[in-house]
């Protein structure tokens, strides 16, 4: 069927008068035949099975049966009238019951003619009954497309209230198939169909909407899932390959004196094998002629900073400047502190630029960047400003990428004639399959081991009722010279309730830990950044023993002497946030602790989150659980969820199909980058259709 037919407005279907069509557009974004065709059922009722009356069990399940009605009577009761029909098959007798529409039923029921009935059975006093069954004459049932597995389509209250019930959806779909004569064009190349033994497109579409058996349905779904993932991966892989062939980067030909000196004389510790491997991967990118676009994933504390610094040295050795961008001032400041220590050993000049950098200092930085005397610039998104002009920027490191948009990342591209090499670091472990979908256009490196000698952080879950015990524990730890974080949820910085909790919490901590023996810092989002920094620095210097904070400390902060993390109302945090927060401790030599405080009432998801935290500290394992609990869209935030707006596949459950699809996309593009070979024509046409009608996940760029 040509694409012209598929673009027919939905109003052409019978039964879709303008008001209903409008609703379909609004509620389900269905405008054309194609949209309707690609509305896949959420689930199916298996109507391939017929039950006999003597097989019924009091399970309350929905069942389908064949039999005849031999008698109908109206029963009058105080509570109202009902119609009762006696329904028989060769194995027994049961009742069908109606409380509404009695008159119509009574007039239309055919006696002694075989019916197919469907519904939920009730068991009472030794007799089964079925209230308000769906009914169809056996003869019609056998002719109808709707006879086997009954698809249930996505719906909404508004839709069903306006009469767009599942039955109507079914009949619209039926019309569409009749009009099309089921002649939908193939959209995958023959070679893939053959190799993977996939169902053809038209069979798959037919079977997903009108499956005759579980087996056919499974094959149809498999084929459509593969196709969906294949075209997403084709797009991502293509982007990546085009990028590598078209986007020139500055080749850093040599590993020079700075890198070598640092490596042989100043390395503060031995690199882990994972750090070395990642450095090699980066080195390979930088040595080629293409621009590097690499995502560096590594759990909190895995040592990404030094890897980034050494990558920066590769740029510096080749005569380029570098910069590093972090999402918060605190974090930028910390990076500045660690990198400065290393940079000074190599006589490199380094500066910090944030929103609160004074005008005079800022001017100087701008000048030195332009004349090339400043080698390394660390900062917040202040780096992205127009006025920040480098003489020769060769590499940009972006820390904690999920806080920056793709858009911001691309601003960095225009800071030099050729785009600088980009290294994105994230401490949010993303399961591999998800990463393939979201960052399919980036290359991925993973630091999957922690530096040696780290002690596992002991994590416990405590109820609010045990608070006094927890306080005693904190006092013991403080007596040993340790420091403590106490974190409160502040999901939206404007939520006054949360603020009240935080301030109440702070006051009770100050009461419990009074001066002069103790001193307590507080940091939250509504403080001026100078005040925040002041408090943070007091804590870093060890002048205060307790830091009461909101999640502003979530990212990156490094205070090795802080060894206890107390998370209040821990049930309100997401898993990845809990994991990030826990990563703030366990940075020094001491045994560290994470205490998750909650009330007694916990949802089952919250319980799972807490149990997971207690059980493991492996970021990737935690990410997998998180993905299962929340689904991919939520994890990546609205910004990227478009990519994951899948119609039929599921990045979590269908990860095997995803890998297969990615491999095939890769093979095809590798052999035929422009998809110009005749056998790939179908891929090219389908792909351009998808782009044209923007219906693969509005991610096309
Ligand atoms: P993250 O990946 O969370 O950014 P950092 O780079 O801040 O981690 O490293 C965490 C701590 O581990 C730092 O104090 C760092 O100096 C130290 N570190 C990094 N790599 C190693 C290593 N190979 N051996 C020992 N300590 C290391
Ligand atoms: Mg870090």
Image (tube, rainbow, N blue to C red):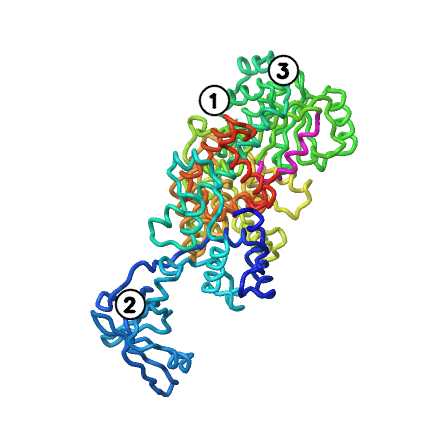
Q: Please tell me the numbered disc located at residue 66.
A: 2
Q: Which residue is found at the position 48% from the left and 37% from the top?
A: 429
Is 60 located above or below residue 509 in the figure?
Answer: below
Q: Give the residue number, with chain letter if any, for mark 3.
A: 317
> How far apart in space, not on screen, are marks 1 and 2 (Cα)?
66 Å
The part of the image, by quadrant, that contains residue 31 is bottom right
Instruction: Name the residue at 20% across, 69% down.
Output: 91
Residue 475 location in percent, x, y? 47, 43
According to the picture, the residue beneath numbered tag 1 turns out to be 277
- Residue 202 higher or lower than 441, as above or below: below
Q: Position of residue 209 (x, y in %)?
A: 43, 54
At mark 1, the secondary structure is: helix
Q: Earlier in the sequence, mark 1 or mark 3?
A: 1
Verify CB contact (< 8 Å) between mark 1 and mark 3. Answer: no
Which callout, 1 or 2, points at the residue further toward the start of the chain? 2
Is residue 70 toward the left or the right of residue 591 in the image?
left
Disc 3 versus disc 2: nearer the observer: 2
- The 10 Å Cα crowd at callout 3, few under 14, some 14 to 19, many 20 or more, is some
- For the record, the magenta segment spans 401-416
Marks 3 and 2, how far apart in space? 82 Å
Q: Is residue 190 visible?
A: yes
Left or right of 225 on screen, residue 61: left
User: What residue is shown at x 56% (from left), y 36% (from top)?
Assistant: 557
């Amino acid at each position: 069927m040509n694409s012209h037919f598929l673009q027919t407005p939905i109003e052409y279907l019978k039964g879709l008068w303008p008001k209903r069509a409008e609703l379909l557009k609004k509620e389900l974004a269905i405008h054309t035949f194609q949209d309707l065709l690609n509305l896949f059922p959420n689930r199916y009722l298996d109507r391939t099975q017929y039950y006999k009356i003597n097989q019924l069990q009091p399970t309350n399940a929905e069942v389908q049966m064949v039999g005849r009605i031999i008698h109908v009577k109206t029963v009058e009761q105080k509570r109202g009238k009902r119609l009762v029909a006696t329904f028989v098959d060769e194995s027994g007798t049961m009742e069908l019951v109606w409380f509404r529409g009695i008159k119509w039923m009574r007039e239309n029921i055919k006696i002694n003619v075989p019916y197919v009935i469907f519904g939920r059975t009730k068991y009472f006093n030794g007799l089964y009954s079925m209230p308000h069954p769906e009914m169809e004459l056996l003869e019609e049932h056998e002719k109808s497309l709707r006879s086997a597995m009954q698809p249930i389509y996505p719906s909404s209250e508004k839709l069903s209230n306006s009469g767009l019930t599942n039955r109507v959806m079914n009949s619209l779909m039926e019309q569409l198939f009749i009009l099309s004569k089921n002649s939908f064009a193939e959209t995958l190349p023959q070679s893939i169909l053959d190799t993977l033994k996939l169902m053809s497109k038209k069979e798959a579409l037919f079977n997903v909407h009108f499956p005759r058996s579980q087996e056919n349905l499974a094959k149809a779904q498999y084929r459509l899932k593969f196709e969906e993932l294949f075209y997403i991966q084709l797009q991502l892989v293509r982007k990546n390959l085009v990028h590598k062939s078209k986007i020139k980067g500055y080749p850093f030909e040599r590993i020079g004196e700075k890198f070598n000196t640092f490596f042989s004389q100043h390395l503060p510790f031995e690199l882990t094998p994972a750090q070395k491997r990642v450095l090699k991967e980066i080195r390979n990118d930088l040595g080629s002629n293409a621009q590097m676009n690499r995502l560096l994933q590594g759990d909190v504390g895995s040592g990404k900073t030094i890897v980034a610094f050494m990558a920066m040295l590769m740029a510096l050795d080749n005569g380029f400047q570098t910069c590093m961008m972090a999402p918060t001032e605190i974090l930028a400041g910390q990076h500045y502190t660690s990198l400065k220590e290393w940079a000074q050993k190599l006589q490199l000049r380094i500066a910090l630029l944030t929103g609160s950098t004074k005008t005079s200092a800022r001017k100087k930085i701008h000048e030195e960047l332009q004349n090339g005397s400043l080698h390394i610039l660390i900062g917040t998104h202040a780096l992205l400003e127009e006025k920040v002009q480098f003489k020769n920027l060769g590499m940009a490191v972006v820390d904690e990428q999920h806080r920056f948009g793709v858009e911001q990342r691309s601003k960095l591209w225009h800071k030099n004639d050729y785009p600088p090499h980009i290294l994105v670091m994230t401490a949010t472990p993303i399961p591999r399959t998800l990463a393939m979908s979201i960052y399919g256009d980036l290359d991925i490196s993973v630091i999957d081991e922690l530096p040696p000698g780290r002690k596992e952080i002991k994590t416990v879950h405590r109820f609010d009722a045990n608070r006094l015990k927890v306080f005693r524990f904190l006092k013991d730890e403080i007596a040993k010279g340790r420091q403590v974080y106490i974190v409160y949820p502040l999901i939206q910085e404007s939520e006054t309730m949360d603020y009240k909790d935080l301030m109440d919490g702070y006051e009770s901590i100050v009461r419990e830990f009074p001066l002069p023996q103790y001193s307590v810092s507080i940091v939250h989002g509504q403080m001026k950044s100078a005040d925040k920094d002041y408090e943070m620095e007091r804590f870093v210097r060890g002048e205060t023993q307790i830091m009461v904070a909101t999640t502003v400390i979530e990212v990156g902060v490094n205070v090795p002497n802080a060894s206890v993390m107390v998370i209040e109302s821990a049930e309100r945090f997401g898993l990845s946030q809990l994991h990030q927060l826990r990563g703030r401790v366990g940075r020094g030599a001491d045994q560290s602790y994470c205490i998750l405080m909650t009330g007694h009432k916990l949802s089952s998801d919250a319980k799972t989150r807490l149990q997971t935290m207690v059980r493991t500290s492996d970021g990737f394992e935690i990410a997998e659980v998180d993905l299962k609990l929340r689904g991919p869209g939520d994890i990546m935030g609205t910004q990227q969820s478009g990519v994951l707006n899948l119609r039929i596949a599921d990045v979590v459950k269908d990860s095997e199909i995803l890998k297969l699809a990615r491999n095939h996309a890769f093979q095809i593009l590798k052999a035929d980058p422009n998809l110009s070979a005749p056998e790939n024509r179908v891929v090219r046409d389908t792909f351009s259709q998808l782009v044209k009608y923007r219906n693969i996940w509005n991610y096309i760029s």
